[in-house]
Amino acid sequence: GVADIRARTLRAVGSAESRFREDPSRIMRAVRLASVLDFCIEEETYAAMLAHHALLRQVSEARLMVEVVKASRDSATWARSLRLLADSGLHAYAFPEVPRDAFLKAARVAQKVADGGSGGESGFSSAAFGESV
């Protein structure tokens, strides 16, 4: 409700566990919304995300990628999204071949770009996953 918006908190409507069982893609949507809005995820909602992450195996890769790509609209949002994916372990569903440390490195680079640091977007993309150009 209004109190959550003022507190910049993302909370599942009703039972988070029920919402995530009904549609597991809501787990990734929570990451996207929290990243885009720069909100924190309420404790019970976050706990339900972690408890039910295996349900993401039921979601197509394309659907998961829609949520991930929507969170890449700017460097600051992308940094928040990458950190949240890595911290929660959800990165393993979005990009199973990319190790957690690479997500954290990409988040640092994206945040540096967002803060006006050097590297630009091409520097971000090459440094994000440890590639040398």
Image (spheres, grey):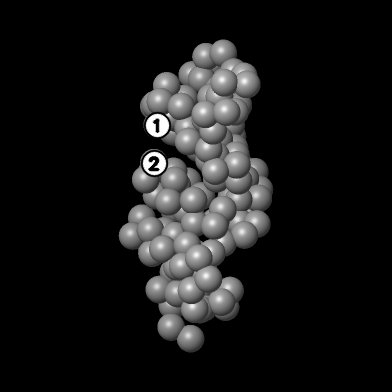
* Residue 37 in which image quadrant: top right
- Provide residue 21's location: percent of width, then percent of height: 54, 21
Label 1: element kind: helix
Q: Is residue 89 above or below residue 123?
A: above
From the viewer's side, name the closer residue of 133 and 36: 36
Q: Which mark is residue 129?
A: none
Q: How many marks?
A: 2
Amino acid beneath label 2: Ser
Counting other residues with Cα less than 10 Å from the Cα at mark 2, is it few (<14), some (14-19), or many (20 or more)? Answer: some
- Provide residue 86's location: percent of width, then percent of height: 39, 49
Residue positioned most to the left: 101
Kindly identify the residue that appears in the image at 46 percent across and 27 percent down: 42
Q: Is residue 40 above or below residue 44?
A: below
- Provide residue 70's location: percent of width, then percent of height: 65, 50
Does residue 43 appear in the picture of this structure?
A: yes
Amino acid beneath label 1: Leu
Q: Which residue is mark 2?
A: 88
Counting other residues with Cα less than 10 Å from the Cα at mark 1, is it few (<14), some (14-19), or many (20 or more)? Answer: some
First of labels 1, 2 by sequence position:
1
Does residue 97 appear in the picture of this structure?
A: no
- Provide residue 84's location: percent of width, then percent of height: 44, 46
Q: Which residue is mark 1?
A: 50
Label 2: element kind: helix
